Every structure is written in C-alpha cells, then in structure tokens.
Image (spheres, rainbow, N blue to C red):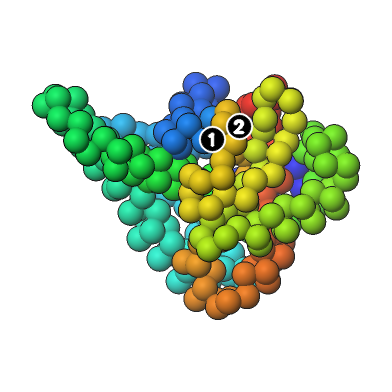
Amino acid sequence: MEATSPEAANLTGVGRRDALKLLGLSSLAGGLFGGASGIFDAALAHSTQGYSLPPLPYDKTALTGFLSAEILEIHHDKHHAGYVKGLTDTLDALAEARTTGDYGAIKSLSRALAFHGSGHVLHSIYWSSMSPHGGGEPTGVVKEHLETSFGSVDAFRKHFAAATKSAEASGWGILAWEPLGNRLVILAAESHQQMGFQGVSPLLVCDVWEHAYYLQYQNRRADYVDKFFDVINWDFLALQLKMVHG
C-alpha cells in the first residue's frame, strides 16, 4: 500500500524544512527519543504561548471498526490537548525560572518537560501511524527495512505486537530508527518517556494508554493491538524512513 493512499499524496508534499522542524520537536522528549519526521505543521507552530494541537489527518469517523469517533474525539481533543498545554506551561515556567534565577522547582519541571513533551511528540506521530486506507502488506523500502532489521515482515509484526502488549501499565509500542547501528528497533515505552533509547527517532507508534482503547475494548488490550495492524499506515512509515535514512 506504499505511497498509494490519499494521505500519501499529501505526505509527498512535505518540505524538508518542515520535516527537520519535527526532528527538533522530538528532541523535547526528555532526550529519550532523538527525533522524528512527518507532516505535523500545526504541531510545530510556535506562538508566545507555545506549541499547537495538530488536527487529525482524517475524519473522526474514518477509523470506525477499529476506533470509534467518540474515542478519537476524547483522545485527541482532551488528552492530546492536555499534553500540549502541559508542555507550553512547563516551557513558560522554565522561562520564568531563567528570568528570576529561581531554580528550586527545576527537578519537577524537567520531569514535566520530559512527560508532556514526549506525550505531544508521540501522539502527533500516533495519529498518522493509522489510516482508513492502511493495513495490508508493506512493499518497497518499508518491506526492505523490516526484513533487514527483523528478518521478515511477519517477525516484525510479532515482535511489535508482543512489545506493545507488554508495556507495563500505560505506555507505547514504538518503531524507531537507531542511527549508530543504521537499523530499526522496537521499544516498549512506559508512560511516555520511560524505557527509552537515547538518540533514536520514533517513526511509527501504537498508544496503549487505557484512554486510547478502553471505551471500546475494555481490558482487551491484546485485541486492540492486533487490530492496529488493520489500519497501520505503511505510507507514513515510508515517508518517515525517507526522512531519517534518505
């Protein structure tokens, strides 16, 4: 399905400058995730108040069958928006600390920066990791990279699913690019920023915080993760790989 969907047509219009901006945005993720690339112009918009909530790349009803419109609305409009606000508030507090010279709260502010920054970055990637035109089998550069890094596409699926299901409490399954080894790696992050890998770039993610699926799947996290592959956006992953690997 690589580079065939309507989303893919939009992705191909992304300028390198915008992609590099998101690489910079990801560096806010507590230093645990070194970069990412993508199409999130709105997520990158700066004002005196900070970052902005990116719009969903599809209608809230577009993933019905996997996730309901109600889940997407609450998740995006409430939870993701909360991380954007938390990131903005934390950056404002850090600016005030620099102005006043009062660093008494630096530990809690550093923790908040890692938490909210990582939450904003990962959610921005999550929305485009899914597509109503997704699923199926990867081809081209995506297939090649998955086979090189994991042995086969099937091995990747099993590894990614197992890691994502295993994330303790609230967390993420993350497919990331590791530049020193020039390969893909799979991480099971806890919260947003814990159990990270310094210097990697998150490319495609699956959110397993309960707010991502509980209204529809209750305690059946495994079912949610298995069905994620029905909407996985290979086109988006192809663009991400192009940005980090060329």
Asked if residue 50 is positioned above or below residue 227 in the image, the reply reads above
Q: Secondary structure at mark 2?
A: loop
In the drawing, does residue 44 fall left or right of residue 136?
Answer: left
Question: Callout 2: few (<14), some (14-19), or many (20+) C-alpha neighbours within 10 Å?
Answer: many
Asked if residue 219 is positioned above or below residue 35 in the image, the reply reads below
Picture mark count: 2
| Mark before the other along the chain sequence, 2 or 1 | 1
Q: Position of residue 95 (x, y in %)?
A: 21, 29
In the drawing, does residue 196 fall left or right of residue 185?
Answer: left
Q: Look at 53% across and 63% down and name the residue there.
A: 169
Q: Which residue is mark 1?
A: 33
Q: Position of residue 193 (x, y in %)?
A: 48, 44
Is residue 190 something one can see in this rendering? yes
Residue 163 occupies which quadrant of the picture? bottom right
Q: Position of residue 201 (x, y in %)?
A: 59, 33
5 or 43, nearer to the observer: 43
Residue 125 occupies which quadrant of the picture? top right
Q: Secondary structure at mark 1?
A: loop
Question: Callout 1: few (<14), some (14-19), or many (20+) C-alpha neighbours within 10 Å?
Answer: many
Residue, far right: 151
Dots 2 and 1: beta carbons under 8 Å? Answer: yes
87 or 2, nearer to the observer: 87
Query: What residue type is disc 1 on?
Result: Phe
Asked if residue 137 is positioned above or below residue 12 in the image, the reply reads below
Q: Look at 33% across and 37% down and name the residue there.
A: 110
Q: Which residue is mark 2?
A: 200
163 or 133, nearer to the observer: 163
Query: What residue type is disc 2 on?
Result: Val
Mark-to-mark CA distance, 2 and 1: 5 Å
